Structures are given as C-alpha cells and as structure tokens.
Image (cartoon, rainbow, N blue to C red):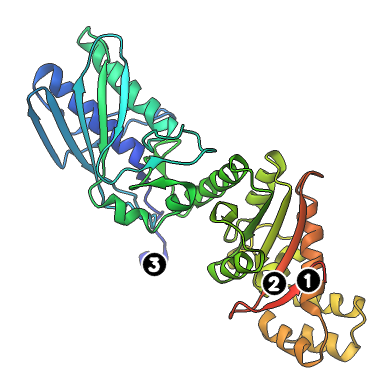
C-alpha cells in the first residue's frame, strides 16, 4: 500500500533566503564573535526556517558565511550551490550596501527592477537581508550599517543555463525569491523571467517582439524577422502568463511562434500549452478543416489521426492549409487577452524550423 502512495514534494529555499540567513549569521559574529549554527530567519510569509552553516570565518573585521542552497524537489539550477556572504561594518548612516561577488551578476540593461550597474540581488532578497541585519543590530543596540557581498562560486557557469544573459545580467546568477520558499515545479522562476524579458524589450524600445514555445521556433522567427536578442521572449508553455502581462505592459507588435500541436491548443482556447493541461483536440481540428472548405473525407482523417503531427501530415498530402487555419484561430485567442495597443500574428514551424502556417497567409 505504501508503495502506491506518493510523498508530497519537498519545498526548498531561494538563494535570497540563503543569503539573508548567511548575512544574519555573519553580522551576529561581527558583533559578538560567535556564529549561530543553525541560523534562523523570518521569511516574508512569517515562516522561520533554520539553515546550517556550510562554512564560516571571522577575521580583520570581516565575517564570511556559506550556506548550501536546498531547492527541495524542484529541478532548480542552483540546487546544491554554495551561497556565500561577506559582511563588514561601515560608517554610521550608510545603511546596507550590496556588492556582487564571484558568480553573482551585474545589471547591464534598462527595464529590470534594478538600475544598470547594480548587483543582481533582487529587491525582495535585499529587503530580507536588510531586515535580518536590522534585527541583529537591535539586539546589540547598534545600527545596521553593513557592506554585504554575495557570491556563488561557479555561478557564472550556472548562469549560462538561465535567461540572465538575455536579460542583460552578466557575470553570474541573480539572487532571487519573493517569498523565500521554492515550491517544486511551480514554474514561478520561468514566469518571472518572461515578465522581465518583456520589461527589457519595452525599455529597449522594441516595437516587434516574438514569444516562442521552444528553441527551434525561436531561432526560426528570429531569422525570419531579423530580431535583436532583446526582442525574444522564451515563453515555453506559458502563453497565458505572457499575454496577460503584455496586456498590462503593451508592446506594439507581438509574433507568437511555435509548433503545430501547441498552437492548435492555443487556437482551441487553451492558455497553458503543457501536455498535462490538455491534449490537442482533434475534433476541433477536424471542424476547422470542414469550415475552411476541406472535404468530409479529410475532416474524418484528421479526426481519427493518432497525433496532431499526423493530422498535419495528412493535410499537407491533401494540399490543405490546416496550419494557416490554426494560426488564424490562435491569433484570435491571443487577441482576446491583449489590449488594442498590441497587434498579434502567429507563425507555425515544423520540427526542422520550416514555416508551415501563418495567421496572415
């Protein structure tokens, strides 16, 4: 019986939470000479997790603490990374200053939550760190005038597996987290990156952006329209999250690019294109064929096809433009979720990157 029950997925802690805990432990050591181990912090939601110190050192007015990030059961690129914080006291009245150490990036493009030139330590982690330092300072009746340097050894290589480069964050990772908690497979980090990509595009004055479901369609649409990198949005399956954010933060023109199966789902009205959220509706595809002037025989073949890909092959053999019809339907769905300020077109590519359907055909 036990083998048939699935254990709940384990939650983890963000790099921001690890940095806040390391900063608290380091500042405590600066003030009384001892490192609390484990060290407990308070997250924005009120949780009070404790963190074991992986390493610590105190010398010449500088305290250094390292904490290993545990992302729980989430496939986080930074799971197991060492988050290192160095703290030292500064002049009264300076408050908390932040620096990017090894493996933590620096902002180089407008449009993000941080100014150009700032270390990529996001606003909520900054508030968490400052709050922990203020709490320690109050215990010792002093001020929280502290220089905080955050490092992640190996972070520059890890960052190549993220969207940081596209967002204009160079030299390493971002210190992230709005709650301090990593919820397994919540995809919140991906959606956060989509939103920041849109912000960067708007700040760069992009008038034509492309949101793609995968790398093949992204390469193809970029080549077709000769788009700059800041115009590219890696939306994956999250078309709903992409469109709703663009509704609030409009772009003049948006091209949606993807494969036939995923954009068939969008055409049928789905805004989450993941296979777990729904499969391709072959009955809907069959109806599109009939409405578009296809024969009853073709419609029946599409309805009984094993997959969407097979339905596309059948349509190609019959020289019927089913992909164009799907693209137009997908465009109509998209237009329902953006403002009138944004024009939308849809392109469908096959697995080799060849254009097989377009909404303006």
- Going from N to C along the chain, the mark reached first, 3 or 2, is 3
Closer to the eye: label 2 or 1: 2
- The answer to whether residue 354 is above or below residue 148 is below
- The answer to whether residue 225 is above or below residue 156 is below
- Which residue is nearer to you in this view: 190 or 21? 190
- Which residue is nearer to you in this view: 201 or 286? 201
Secondary element at tag 3: loop
Secondary element at tag 2: strand
Is residue 359 shown left or right of residue 94?
Answer: right
Mark 3 burial class by Cα count in 10 Å: few <14, some 14-19, many 20+: few
Q: Is residue 307 visible?
A: no
Q: Residue at x 34, y 51 (%)?
A: 72
Residue located beneath label 2 in the image? 348
In the picture, the disc for residue 336 is none
Is residue 45 shown left or right of residue 301?
Answer: left
The percent position of residue 89, horizontal first and vertical second, equals 20, 18
The percent position of residue 125, horizontal first and vertical second, equals 38, 32
Closer to the eye: label 1 or 3: 1
Which quarter of the rendering shows the C terminus? Answer: bottom right
- Going from N to C along the chain, the mark reached first, 1 or 3, is 3
Residue located beneath label 1 in the image? 326
Tag 3–tag 2 contact (CB < 8 Å)? no
In the picture, the disc for residue 1 is 3
């Amino acid at each position: 019986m036990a083998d048939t029950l699935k254990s709940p997925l384990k939650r983890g802690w963000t790099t921001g939470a690890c940095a806040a805990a390391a900063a608290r432990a380091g500042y405590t050591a600066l003030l009384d000479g001892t490192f609390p181990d484990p060290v407990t912090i308070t997250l924005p939601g009120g949780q009070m997790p404790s963190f074991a110190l992986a390493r610590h050192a105190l010398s010449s007015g500088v305290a250094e603490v390292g904490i290993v990030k545990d992302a729980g059961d989430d496939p986080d690129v930074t799971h197991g990374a060492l988050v290192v914080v160095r703290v030292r006291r500064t002049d009264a009245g300076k408050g908390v200053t932040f620096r990017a150490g090894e493996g933590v990036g620096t902002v180089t493009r407008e449009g993000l939550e941080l100014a150009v030139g700032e270390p990529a330590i996001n606003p909520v982690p900054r508030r968490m760190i400052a709050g922990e330092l203020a709490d320690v300072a109050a215990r010792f009746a002093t001020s929280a005038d502290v220089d905080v340097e955050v490092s992640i050894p190996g972070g520059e290589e890890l960052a190549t597996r993220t969207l940081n480069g596209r967002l204009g964050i160079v030299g390493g990772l971002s210190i992230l987290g709005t709650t301090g908690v990593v919820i397994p497979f919540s995809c919140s980090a991906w959606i956060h990156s989509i939103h920041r990509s849109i912000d960067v595009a708007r700040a760069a004055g992009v008038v034509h952006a492309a949101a793609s479901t995968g790398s093949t369609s992204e390469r193809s649409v970029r080549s077709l329209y000769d788009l700059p990198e800041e115009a590219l949005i890696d939306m994956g399956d999250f078309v709903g999250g992409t469109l709703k954010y663009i509704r609030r933060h409009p772009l003049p023109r948006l091209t949606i690019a993807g494969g036939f199966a995923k954009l068939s789902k969008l055409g049928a009205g789905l805004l989450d294109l993941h296979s777990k959220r729904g499969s391709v509706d072959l009955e809907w595809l069959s109806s599109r064929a009939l409405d578009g002037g296809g024969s009853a025989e073709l419609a029946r073949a599409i309805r009984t096809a094993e997959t969407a890909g097979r339905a596309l092959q059948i349509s190609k053999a019959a020289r019927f433009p089913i992909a164009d019809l799907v693209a137009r339907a997908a465009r109509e769905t998209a237009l329902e979720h953006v403002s009138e300020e944004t024009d939308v077109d849809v392109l469908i590519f096959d697995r080799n990157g060849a254009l097989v359907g377009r909404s303006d055909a």
